[in-house]
Amino acid sequence: MGAILDPATTGIVVMAFVFITLAAGVHIGVSLGLGGLIGMALAISPDAALAQLASVPFATTNSFALAVIPLFVLMGSLATQARLTTELYTAAHNWLGRLHGGLAMATTLASAAFGAACGSTIVNAAVFTRIALPEMTRYGYDKRLAAGCIAASGTLASLIPPSILMVIYAIITEQSVARLLMAGLVPGLLSAAIYMSGIYVRARLNPKIAPMPDFHVSRKEKWKSLYGVWGITFLFALVIGGIYMGWFIPTYAGAIGAFGAFLIVLGKRRMSRAGMIETFRDAGITTTTIFIIVIGGILFARWLTYTGLVANISDYLLALQLAPHVYLLCFAAIYLILGMLIEPISIMVMTLPVMFPIMVGVGFDPIWLGVISIKLAEISLITPPVGLNVYVVRSASPIPLSLEDVFAGIMPFLLLDIITLALLIIFPSIVLFLPNLMM
């Protein structure tokens, strides 16, 4: 039995199906997967759709390249079990607490450092909401500034390696995972530095939102607190240093990093049966959620590719011969609009099969484009009305906090993100410097 509808009509049916199911609350991975299967059944044949259903889920979960995702997730879960976040925040608090906006700056710095072991924006935001929000409000910080800082800083885990979004981008676009992870390091640190600079300027201009805390830490206590940072430093050097030096590929790095985090938990004597069960359970749930989205996205992408829709759309848009930055502006607009509705992994699996060939076709470097995509995904995490990190901070908050408070606090950080994005676009070498050294 062959095709039932032509590709164009099938496209209308499938997109209508996806939007209706999403509006009805169906999981994005299920919606995309079913849409792709319906599209292949209508445009190619039901047998083709069944063949893809039989092969794609196993091939995806059995992929050696994608094995890095559960390993990075497990490494972040074990780092949380070892309470590395608390020690990071204590050290940053001791060193920066006496500066204008110092506690918020400490949160940003500690969140960036934890991103080097975690790789998950959701985990990052949830953990620091419980640790840093009560501390900042206790010292008189405006809760909107505190909540906005935590929600924005949580997105740094998307860029600073190891980043799960970077791995997803690499798999979808068939790029080097190692080069992409290296490409995110300098932009991630730049984002953190711009956040901290913005916090300092705001605190100087309006001291009421970030009063100077009345506490004193001796020089000895400052240096002693750095001892607690060794765990994150060890994991970062082990994973990223090993990848950069070419000692092992990212999947092996994930395994070594997870084992290193396990040893840290043992060394700190923070292992309990209940705690480890909870850690592995959380890592399994997070990994399963990610893989459902990836499998659904691959099925959707197969439909787009097999019916020729990707090639047709790409050829049409390239034939318009617009200026490259017009295409980039459209790419950014699509990300930001979708970011108001769905989370970043879903955006990437929906858009990259179509947009990546177009963007590379007009001359953009695929590694640079990966970092720009992730930065846009970061911005979408804090963009109203459905900024995912905003809801995470609101849900995890141990103090009374409304969504309006968090969204109000996030607005200055959105402006800072736009500055960072502009710098990455104007100066591509910020992104490509480290990856080019690996060639």
Image (cartoon, rainbow, N blue to C red):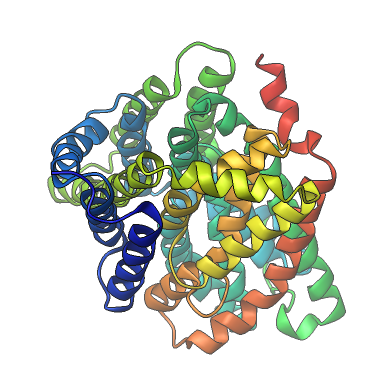
Tally of numbered tags: 0
> Dividing the image into 4 quarters, which one contains the C terminus?
top right
Q: Is residue 114 visible?
A: no
Q: What residue is at 84 percent from the left and 69 percent from the top?
A: 201
Front residue (pair 50, 381): 50
Name of the residue lying farthest toward the top: 247
> Dividing the image into 4 quarters, which one contains the N terminus?
top left
- Left or right of residue 341: residue 16: left
Quarter holding residue 66:
top left
- Left or right of residue 214: residue 263: left
Residue 102 x, y percent position in the rendering:
71, 64
Q: What residue is at 52 percent from the left and 31 percent from the top?
A: 236
Residue 117 x, y percent position in the rendering:
46, 40
Q: What residue is at 31 percent from the left and 52 percent from the top?
A: 293
Q: What residue is at 56 percent from the left and 69 percent from the top?
A: 337
Residue 107 x, y percent position in the rendering:
60, 60
- Left or right of residue 333: residue 300: left
**As displayed, is residue 100 above or below residue 331?**
below
**As displayed, is residue 319 above or below residue 142?**
above
Front residue (pair 21, 395): 21
**As displayed, is residue 175 above or below residue 374?**
above
Quarter holding residue 205:
bottom right
Residue 180 x, y percent position in the rendering:
57, 32
Front residue (pair 377, 78): 377
- Left or right of residue 250: residue 243: right
Q: Is residue 207 visible?
A: yes
